[in-house]
Image (cartoon, rainbow, N blue to C red):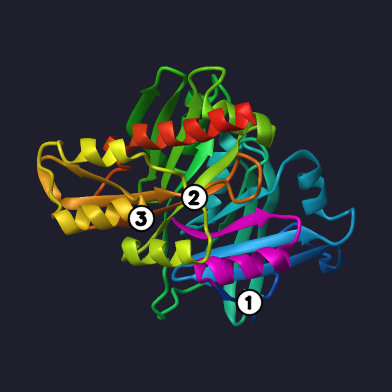
Amino acid sequence: MKIEHVHFYVEDAKAWRDWFVSTLGFEVVDDYMLPPYPLDYENENHTCTQVVKSGSICFVLSSPLLPNSPVAEFLCYHPPGVADVAFAVENIQDIHERALRYGAKILQPISKYDWNGNYTQFSKIKAWGSLSHTLIETHLFSPNPKELPLVNIDHIVLNVPTGELENAVAWYEKILDFQPQQVFNIQTKNSGLHSRVMISRCSGVQLPINQPATHNSQIQEFLDFNRGAGIQHIALGSSNLLETISLFRSRNLRFLVVPPSYYSQLVTRPGFPLSTSEIDALTQQEILVDWREDNPGALLLQIFTQPIFGQPTFFFEFIERRNLAKGFGEGNFRALFEAIEREQLKRATQ
């Protein structure tokens, strides 16, 4: 299983296409044919769809042209964001049988499509909240060989309401064959969250699932503004995060602020692996860094944008894994939570 594409529902697909190109360095897919996905658009006249890609990352952007567009219905209830995460799968029939066995809702039955000489099967199932998963039994987009700032989707994060975490974990385990990998429980003096990291057994696709631990948690704020469960952020991989973030800052992309105290504490951690020049560069770009004490050469670099759609919902993470670094930056998890919490407190005082 691989992530085939992520489908955003937005108010102006062309404007966001241009944003992804001018800000994040994506390229437009000019020859994209609307079938075989998104699957609910039998009539293109009501919806404008644009496609951008970078490396193996493919984002589909759709906005309504008429009130009967499915995107218009989505945006009446939710802010702009991720409506569908599509997976390339090896055996679509097997997933459908499991989905039916465990009571999942089938939004689109298995259909066949002859696309550019390729034989493709596809379908769609309802996931958590208004999120759906398109299933495609072929991989239709190949990585772009050009050197681009962003090359892959590292992981996608789903937020669910209090009390639904275990059910969501079980759903992804039973139907899509994910397995629990890590557990995070973060508590600050103001709020907290519980998180379970799910990973595909066959491919390594990673899906952390969060639920709020307190009523004023940033996860609860997301759920309130999003009006239910949804994708909170997507982590995009870079082969040189320092250069990438310097470029993005020059294009006025806004990031979460990291206090200087984070870096003064960082250098006191056991096994600190960075030179003075390296930590100075990371400090200047406000990039978080993590490592395991038993393998300090495997560095995980991370940085997080401000919400991109205006409301405190969806944002991007940019990540670099050096020397096959694993995990999700356990040492940075609290720093991220506190950084988002500071922005949440700012909004409360505005």
Instruction: Tell me what residue is drawn at x 44 percent, y 71 percent.
Output: 55
Q: Quadrant of residue 127?
A: top right
Q: CA distance from mark 1 to mark 3?
A: 44 Å
Image quadrant in which you'd find residue 63: bottom right
**Picture coordinates of residue 133, whole percent (x, y):** 59, 49
Residue drawn at x 67%, y 39% is: 105
> Picture coordinates of residue 179 (x, y %)?
37, 38
Mark 2 or 1 closer to N-term?
1
Between disc 2 and disc 3, whose residue precedes?
3
Q: Image height check: is 158 above or below 277?
A: above
Residue 285 is marked as 3
Element on which disc 1 rests: strand
What amino acid is found at the position of numbered circle 2 in the picture?
A: Thr
On residue 305, which mark appears? 2
Q: From the viewer's side, name the closer residue of 250 and 12.
A: 250
In the rendered view, would you say 103 is above or below 61? Answer: above
Asked if residue 11 lies left or right of residue 54, the reply is right
Write the start and end of the magenta stretch as one range: 1-26
Task: Write the residue at 69% across / 48% down.
Answer: 80
Name the foreground residue: 64 vs 128. Answer: 64
Relative depth, front residue between 129 and 348: 348
Q: Secondary structure at mark 3?
A: helix
Residue beneath disc 1: 115
Q: Are marks 1 and 3 in contact (CB under 8 Å)?
A: no
39 or 190: nearer the eye? Answer: 190
Q: Residues within 10 Å of mark 1 (few under 14, many from 20)?
A: few
> Is residue 16 shown left or right of residue 54?
right
* Residue kind at label 3, given as amino acid type: Gln
Residue 52 placement (x, y as % from top left): 58, 70
**For residue 114, which quarter of the picture?**
bottom right
Location of the N terminus by quadrant is: bottom left
95 inside magenta stretch? no
